[in-house]
Amino acid sequence: MSLFLDLIFPKICYGCGQKGDYLCPKCQKNIHVLNTKAPQNGFDGGLSLFKYDSAIKSAIIDLKYHFVSDNIDILVNFIVKTLKSDFPNLIKYWQQNNFILIPIPLHPSRQNWRGFNQSQLLAQKIASKLSLDFSDEIIIRHQETMPQARLKNTKDRTKNVVNIFSLNPNIGKIKHKNFILFDDVSTTQSTLSSAQNTLKTLSPLHCWYLTLSAG
Ligand SMILES: [Zn+2]
Protein backbone atom coordinates (compact mmCIF):
# COMPACT_ATOMS: atom_id res chain seq x y z
CA MET A 1 0.00 0.00 0.00
CA SER A 2 2.69 2.47 0.94
CA LEU A 3 4.68 1.62 -2.21
CA PHE A 4 1.55 2.27 -4.24
CA LEU A 5 1.02 5.62 -2.48
CA ASP A 6 4.66 6.52 -3.02
CA LEU A 7 4.09 6.18 -6.74
CA ILE A 8 1.08 8.47 -6.71
CA PHE A 9 2.30 10.92 -4.08
CA PRO A 10 6.09 10.74 -4.13
CA LYS A 11 7.72 12.12 -0.99
CA ILE A 12 9.51 15.38 -1.70
CA CYS A 13 12.32 16.59 0.55
CA TYR A 14 11.35 19.70 2.57
CA GLY A 15 14.86 21.00 2.15
CA CYS A 16 15.92 20.47 -1.45
CA GLY A 17 12.79 19.28 -3.21
CA GLN A 18 14.35 15.98 -4.25
CA LYS A 19 12.01 13.01 -4.60
CA GLY A 20 12.30 10.05 -2.23
CA ASP A 21 12.16 11.32 1.34
CA TYR A 22 10.61 14.17 3.37
CA LEU A 23 14.01 14.93 4.89
CA CYS A 24 16.82 13.59 2.76
CA PRO A 25 20.08 12.62 4.54
CA LYS A 26 21.91 15.62 3.08
CA CYS A 27 19.30 18.12 4.32
CA GLN A 28 19.14 16.39 7.74
CA LYS A 29 22.84 17.12 8.13
CA ASN A 30 22.33 20.79 7.24
CA ILE A 31 19.62 21.40 9.84
CA HIS A 32 20.89 23.80 12.48
CA VAL A 33 20.55 22.33 16.01
CA LEU A 34 20.27 24.93 18.80
CA ASN A 35 21.40 24.77 22.43
CA THR A 36 19.66 24.52 25.78
CA LYS A 37 18.75 27.77 27.51
CA ALA A 38 19.63 28.71 31.07
CA PRO A 39 16.79 29.31 33.57
CA GLN A 40 14.69 32.35 32.63
CA ASN A 41 11.11 33.66 32.85
CA GLY A 42 10.37 31.22 35.65
CA PHE A 43 11.51 28.18 33.65
CA ASP A 44 14.26 25.98 35.06
CA GLY A 45 15.60 25.51 31.56
CA GLY A 46 14.51 25.19 27.99
CA LEU A 47 15.38 23.76 24.65
CA SER A 48 14.29 24.95 21.22
CA LEU A 49 15.71 22.15 19.16
CA PHE A 50 16.06 23.56 15.65
CA LYS A 51 16.36 26.94 14.05
CA TYR A 52 13.05 27.83 12.36
CA ASP A 53 14.23 27.92 8.77
CA SER A 54 14.61 25.89 5.57
CA ALA A 55 13.56 22.24 5.81
CA ILE A 56 12.23 22.41 9.40
CA LYS A 57 10.08 25.45 8.66
CA SER A 58 8.55 23.75 5.60
CA ALA A 59 8.01 20.53 7.56
CA ILE A 60 6.16 22.32 10.38
CA ILE A 61 4.00 24.37 8.00
CA ASP A 62 3.15 21.25 6.01
CA LEU A 63 2.27 19.37 9.19
CA LYS A 64 0.04 22.19 10.40
CA TYR A 65 -1.93 22.57 7.20
CA HIS A 66 -1.64 19.26 5.32
CA PHE A 67 -1.43 16.61 7.96
CA VAL A 68 -0.25 13.25 6.64
CA SER A 69 0.66 10.52 9.04
CA ASP A 70 3.98 9.55 7.49
CA ASN A 71 5.44 13.06 7.53
CA ILE A 72 4.82 13.36 11.27
CA ASP A 73 6.55 10.02 11.86
CA ILE A 74 9.59 11.03 9.83
CA LEU A 75 9.78 14.32 11.70
CA VAL A 76 9.39 12.60 15.09
CA ASN A 77 12.12 10.08 14.25
CA PHE A 78 14.45 12.91 13.34
CA ILE A 79 13.61 14.87 16.53
CA VAL A 80 14.15 11.81 18.74
CA LYS A 81 17.40 10.89 16.97
CA THR A 82 18.72 14.46 17.47
CA LEU A 83 17.63 14.62 21.13
CA LYS A 84 19.35 11.30 21.85
CA SER A 85 22.56 12.16 20.05
CA ASP A 86 22.96 15.82 21.06
CA PHE A 87 21.27 15.96 24.49
CA PRO A 88 21.68 12.51 26.12
CA ASN A 89 22.17 13.91 29.64
CA LEU A 90 19.11 16.11 29.45
CA ILE A 91 16.95 13.19 28.28
CA LYS A 92 18.31 11.03 31.11
CA TYR A 93 17.56 13.80 33.63
CA TRP A 94 13.98 14.12 32.35
CA GLN A 95 13.48 10.35 32.40
CA GLN A 96 14.94 9.79 35.85
CA ASN A 97 12.90 12.59 37.39
CA ASN A 98 9.59 11.61 35.82
CA PHE A 99 9.06 14.80 33.88
CA ILE A 100 5.62 14.99 32.27
CA LEU A 101 5.54 16.30 28.69
CA ILE A 102 2.56 18.64 28.24
CA PRO A 103 1.64 20.02 24.82
CA ILE A 104 0.30 23.58 24.60
CA PRO A 105 -3.42 23.04 24.01
CA LEU A 106 -5.41 24.67 21.25
CA HIS A 107 -8.76 26.22 22.00
CA PRO A 108 -11.41 23.49 21.43
CA SER A 109 -13.06 25.42 18.60
CA ARG A 110 -9.75 25.83 16.80
CA GLN A 111 -8.87 22.18 17.29
CA ASN A 112 -12.27 21.15 15.91
CA TRP A 113 -11.77 23.37 12.90
CA ARG A 114 -8.31 21.99 12.19
CA GLY A 115 -9.16 18.45 13.23
CA PHE A 116 -6.03 17.95 15.30
CA ASN A 117 -3.41 19.74 17.40
CA GLN A 118 -0.02 19.16 15.80
CA SER A 119 1.84 19.94 19.06
CA GLN A 120 -0.22 17.33 20.88
CA LEU A 121 0.47 14.68 18.22
CA LEU A 122 4.18 15.47 18.17
CA ALA A 123 4.50 15.51 21.97
CA GLN A 124 2.62 12.25 22.36
CA LYS A 125 4.86 10.45 19.88
CA ILE A 126 8.07 11.99 21.25
CA ALA A 127 7.11 11.08 24.83
CA SER A 128 6.37 7.52 23.82
CA LYS A 129 9.68 7.09 21.99
CA LEU A 130 11.70 8.63 24.84
CA SER A 131 9.75 6.84 27.61
CA LEU A 132 8.60 10.11 29.14
CA ASP A 133 5.25 10.64 30.82
CA PHE A 134 2.72 12.56 28.76
CA SER A 135 -0.47 14.42 29.61
CA ASP A 136 -2.78 16.57 27.52
CA GLU A 137 -5.34 16.83 30.32
CA ILE A 138 -3.67 19.04 32.90
CA ILE A 139 -4.16 22.44 31.30
CA ILE A 140 -6.94 23.64 29.05
CA ARG A 141 -7.19 26.68 26.83
CA HIS A 142 -10.38 28.46 27.76
CA GLN A 143 -9.91 31.52 25.62
CA GLU A 144 -9.53 31.88 21.89
CA THR A 145 -6.79 34.22 20.75
CA MET A 146 -5.48 35.78 17.61
CA PRO A 147 -2.60 33.73 16.12
CA GLN A 148 0.65 35.02 17.65
CA ALA A 149 2.28 35.14 14.21
CA ARG A 150 -0.10 37.96 13.23
CA LEU A 151 1.13 40.16 16.07
CA LYS A 152 4.43 41.79 15.43
CA ASN A 153 5.77 42.96 18.77
CA THR A 154 6.51 41.18 22.05
CA LYS A 155 4.21 43.45 24.08
CA ASP A 156 1.15 42.62 21.96
CA ARG A 157 2.01 38.91 21.92
CA THR A 158 2.36 38.84 25.70
CA LYS A 159 -0.97 40.66 26.16
CA ASN A 160 -2.68 38.34 23.66
CA VAL A 161 -2.05 35.22 25.76
CA VAL A 162 -2.47 36.45 29.35
CA ASN A 163 -4.77 34.17 31.37
CA ILE A 164 -5.83 32.05 28.40
CA PHE A 165 -5.09 28.73 30.12
CA SER A 166 -6.61 27.15 33.19
CA LEU A 167 -6.18 23.94 35.11
CA ASN A 168 -8.49 21.11 34.23
CA PRO A 169 -10.86 20.97 37.24
CA ASN A 170 -11.12 17.19 36.88
CA ILE A 171 -7.47 16.36 37.38
CA GLY A 172 -6.59 14.68 40.64
CA LYS A 173 -3.52 15.11 42.81
CA ILE A 174 -0.64 16.24 40.67
CA LYS A 175 1.13 18.63 43.01
CA HIS A 176 4.94 18.82 43.14
CA LYS A 177 5.62 17.21 39.78
CA ASN A 178 8.14 18.00 37.06
CA PHE A 179 6.79 19.38 33.81
CA ILE A 180 8.03 20.05 30.29
CA LEU A 181 5.79 22.31 28.25
CA PHE A 182 5.89 21.46 24.56
CA ASP A 183 5.11 23.60 21.52
CA ASP A 184 6.05 23.32 17.86
CA VAL A 185 7.39 26.85 17.35
CA SER A 186 8.17 29.57 19.85
CA THR A 187 9.22 33.10 19.08
CA THR A 188 8.71 35.30 22.12
CA GLN A 189 7.87 32.48 24.58
CA SER A 190 4.74 34.40 25.60
CA THR A 191 2.46 31.38 25.18
CA LEU A 192 4.84 29.07 27.04
CA SER A 193 5.13 31.58 29.90
CA SER A 194 1.37 31.95 30.13
CA ALA A 195 0.94 28.15 30.34
CA GLN A 196 3.70 27.97 32.91
CA ASN A 197 1.91 30.54 35.06
CA THR A 198 -1.12 28.27 35.11
CA LEU A 199 1.01 25.28 36.09
CA LYS A 200 2.54 27.26 38.97
CA THR A 201 -0.60 26.73 41.04
CA LEU A 202 0.41 23.04 41.18
CA SER A 203 3.69 24.00 42.88
CA PRO A 204 5.79 22.07 40.37
CA LEU A 205 9.28 21.03 41.41
CA HIS A 206 10.74 21.96 38.04
CA CYS A 207 9.33 23.31 34.84
CA TRP A 208 11.14 23.12 31.49
CA TYR A 209 10.04 23.85 27.97
CA LEU A 210 10.79 22.00 24.76
CA THR A 211 9.96 23.42 21.37
CA LEU A 212 10.68 21.93 18.02
CA SER A 213 12.05 25.20 16.80
CA ALA A 214 12.60 28.85 17.60
CA GLY A 215 11.85 31.62 15.18
ZN1 LIG B 1 16.95 17.32 0.80
Image: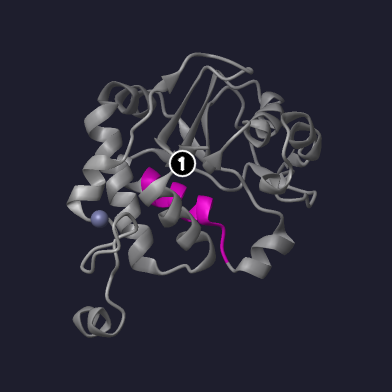
* Quadrant hosting residue 162: top right
In this image, 73 relative to 141: left or right? left
130 w.r.t. 117: above or below: above
Label tally: 1
Q: Which residue is mark 1?
A: 52
Q: Position of residue 114 (x, y in %)?
A: 62, 67
Q: Is residue 8 magenta?
A: no
Q: Is residue 208 left or right of residue 165?
A: left
Percent x, y for residue 133? 43, 39
- The colour scheme used to paint the residues is one colour
SS at mark 1 in the image? loop
**Residue 123 painted magenta:** yes
Above or below 66: residue 171: above
Quadrant the N terminus occupies: bottom left
The extreme top residue here reads 39
- Can you tell which quarter of the image residue 84 is in? top left
Residue 33: image location, x then y, percent: 33, 33
Query: Residue at the spot x=73%, y=33% of the render?
Result: 153
Q: Nearer the viewer, residue 17 or 50?
A: 17
Seen at 23% across and 83% down, the residue is 7
Q: Residues within 10 Å of mark 1 (few under 14, many from 20)?
A: many
In magenta, the rendered stretch is 116-127
Q: Quadrant of ligand 1?
A: bottom left
Give the residue type at disc 1.
Tyr
Identify which residue is drawn at 67% across, 69% down: 113
Which of the pair 36/127 is nearer the observer?
A: 36
In front of the other: 39 or 14: 14
Q: Is residue 181 left or right of residue 146?
A: left
Q: Main secondary structure of the magenta part?
A: helix
**Residue at 75 percent of width and 32 percent of height:** 158
